[in-house]
Image (cartoon, helix red, strand yellow):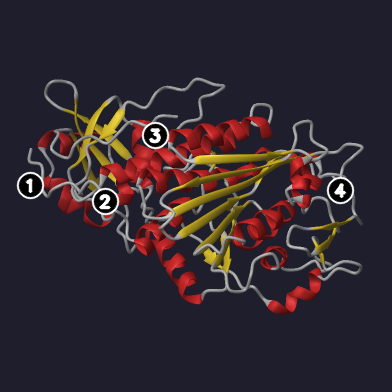
Amino acid sequence: MSLPPLVSSRSSGIPVYLVSAAEWEERLSALPDFVAAAARAHSFRPKPGNHLLALNGKGTVGGVLFGVAAPDDPAYDPFIFGTLPTVLPAGTYKFADPPAKPDLAALSWLLGSYAFTRYKSKPAVEAVLVTPRGVNSEDMLRMAEAVAFGRDLVNTPTSDLGPDSLESAAVKFAKSRQAKFKVVTGSRLIDKGFPLIHAVGRAGDEEPRLITLTWGDKEHPLVTLVGKGVVFDTGGLDIKTSNSMQLMKKDMGGAAAALAAADMIMSAELPVRLKVVIPVVENSVSGNSFRPGDVIKSRKGLTVEIGNTDAEGRLILADALAFADEEQPDLLIDFATLTGAARVALGPDLPPFYTRDAALADQIQKIGMEIHDPVWRMPLWAPYNSYIDGEIADVNNSSNAPYAGSVTAALFLQRFVEPSTRWVHFDIFAWTPYSRPGRPKGGEVQAARLVYTLLKRRYRARPQTPATEEEPAPTE
């Protein structure tokens, strides 16, 4: 969907007064008379997220009170501003007080403007924000629009986003960014050396495939993003329960995150050579489904014993990662809705990530917390490798122990990446189970903004539109 842009910082707008409980009584006396009168008349309390429209002498909205928490308050949510575009009437608004984190305030306003409307009309958001001072509006909109693109993909049911449609979306995106693309489909996957991708997807009505996008100057460092593209996961012959299948349209959330990150990178023209690799399958049940106990030789040459057909994501990623690693990228990153164990450990909002590079891990975790795209490092704990040793093959795709499910999945993937490669694996959820400011219930794009920010800093982004100039605070 298209999001409303941020308005020039030099524009006028209805003032939004940011107030907290700690300073409320003092602040109340300093507000314009009509705003203070409205607050008293309605017994307004500055609880985070509370808002009040104050009418001026003309009978129109002349100011808005909005409750926030102090940044050092445990209740502080930098995305609280995502509430505002959903509750304010049409108009242009401007923060009368500088938010503690202006970039995140602007971004959360944009992210809060998102709605998935393909099947059900919803009122258009007509409340727009004047860019806070010091904020690069172009970059905020770039990230918000990429997130909206990814959210739309995750929210679309498999009836309208099977392998064919996901390919069409990726190709359309590639053309819009002048990127090259290549698609290997069906039995050609075997001919081209992707047997695991073919095995997982061969039972689907639409053929499995590997989509590759390339963009950028060949002289720049190669960065490769890999995204798991399971458009629907029945579990295969180890079939899921009906409850477990409810959200399986989101099992291509890794592909959505990779494409969203690529959108940001390409839009910003970062000085990298970017490759995006997306294995796409539907894990279905049919007479030719792959079976528990099968042994399949991977692209890497390792033989894989199938312990569980519901551990299919790591199989298609194994071939995709091995392929991506052959070019020796400077940085190899994969996104995957890989394990329920990750949710048990860290919940829906805090994806674990894995890497062998301690310095890179530290940078990733700090950036994630800074930009409110949080992740948490988990260990590639070598002793657990014994859990996935195969009995009759090199490796089993399912652990023989009921522990550390996210760790053993990451250890499985690690076997398909050379030890010298700087590799990061994100085990994302790709879903917001309940609505919060800036994060409506439904598809979510986790770790994409983080990766974009990491690459900007790591490879020194080209100069962009400068942040808005400082200007005097608004007066009443």
Locate the C terminus and report the quarter of the image it occupies.
top left
**Contact between labelled residues 4 and 1, with CB atoms less than 8 Å apart:** no
Q: Amino acid at mark 4?
A: Asp
Above or below, 139 against 425 in this view is above
Q: Which residue is mark 4?
A: 238
User: How many other residues sit within 10 Å of disc 4, few (<14), some (14-19) or many (≥20)?
Assistant: some
Residue 102: which disc? 2
Question: Residue at (32%, 54%) from the top-left corner?
Answer: 69
Q: Amino acid at mark 2?
A: Pro
**Contact between labelled residues 2 and 3, with CB atoms less than 8 Å apart:** no
Above or below, 263 against 74 in this view is above
Above or below, 26 against 361 in this view is above
User: How many other residues sit within 10 Å of disc 3, few (<14), some (14-19) or many (≥20)?
Assistant: many
Question: Residue at (58%, 47%) from the top-left corner?
Answer: 430
Q: Which residue is mark 3?
A: 113
Q: Earlier in the sequence, mark 4 or mark 3?
A: 3
Q: Amino acid at mark 3?
A: Ser
Cα–Cα span, label 2 and label 1: 16 Å
